[in-house]
Amino acid sequence: MPGPRRTVFATRAPTFEKNLIPSRKGAKIERMAEDSDYAGALRSAALRVTRPRMAVLQAVEQHPHADTELIIRAARDVLPDISRQTVYDALNALAATGLVRRIQPAGSVARYETRVADNHHHMVCRSCGVIADVDCAVGDAPCLTASDDLGFDVDEAEVIYWGFCPRCTASRMSRSHP
Ligand SMILES: [Zn+2]
Ligand SMILES: [Zn+2]
Ligand SMILES: [Zn+2]
């Protein structure tokens, strides 16, 4: 288990998306700004800064709850020659240091996200498999308070809400009421 988790991207992620500039020149500037942040995040986790690790971190940040296949495709947009094994190794290093969080709902392959350290939970659609974030109470993590912690030093509560997403609910309704 990784130690206490650091908040690295949780508050920064939306800023990146807002600042994405479509022009070629703007995109290049944005890429450089992101690179320096990814490098800083790697250093803060005592990881050596490498292009593959930065590419994988960027891929996970831009595709929350992505599986490995999507992360490989996204990383190859940045580093066309990156191998599958290199992506696996980078994901393992990033997850081990808590820079990314690995979640694996039952029946799903592993998914990754850079939203760490806030003990948020997930809502999973039984039909299409879409995964959405559910906040814990703001400024608190009540699910970490077990009715009896049995003497454990608890640092994470994994809660998954299962159900049907709005789109699947609507299509189920229209099927049963044509
Ligand atoms: Zn669904
Ligand atoms: Zn999440
Ligand atoms: Zn909670």
Image: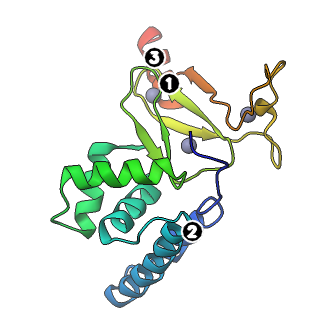
* Circle 2 crowding by C-alpha within 10 Å: few under 14, some 14–19, many from 20: some
**Ligand 1 visible in quadrant:** top left
Left or right of 62? Residue 2 is right
* Circle 1 crowding by C-alpha within 10 Å: few under 14, some 14–19, many from 20: few
The residue at 42%/61% (across/down) is 57
Would the CB of label 2 be found within 8 Å of ligand 2? no
* Circle 3 crowding by C-alpha within 10 Å: few under 14, some 14–19, many from 20: some
Residue 109 sits above or below residue 97 on the image: above
Identified by mark 2, the residue type is Ser
Mark whose residue sits in front, 2 or 1: 2
Residue denoted by label 3: 172
Q: Is residue 21 visible?
A: no
The residue at 81%/47% (across/down) is 138
Identified by mark 1, the residue type is Ala
Mark whose residue sits in front, 3 or 2: 2
Quarter residue 132 falls in: top right
Query: Which numbered dot is residue 170?
Result: 1
Report, in whole angstroms, how far the alpha carbon at label 3 lies from the one at label 2.
47 Å
Identified by mark 3, the residue type is Arg
Of the pair 101 and 3, the residue shown nearer to us:
3
Residue denoted by label 2: 44
Marks 3,2: beta carbons within 8 A? no
Quarter residue 26 falls in: bottom left
- Residue farthest toward the bottom in the current orientation of the protein: 25
The residue at 48%/67% (across/down) is 42
State the image coordinates of residue 114 (x, y, percent, origin top left).
52, 54
Marks 1,3: beta carbons within 8 A? yes
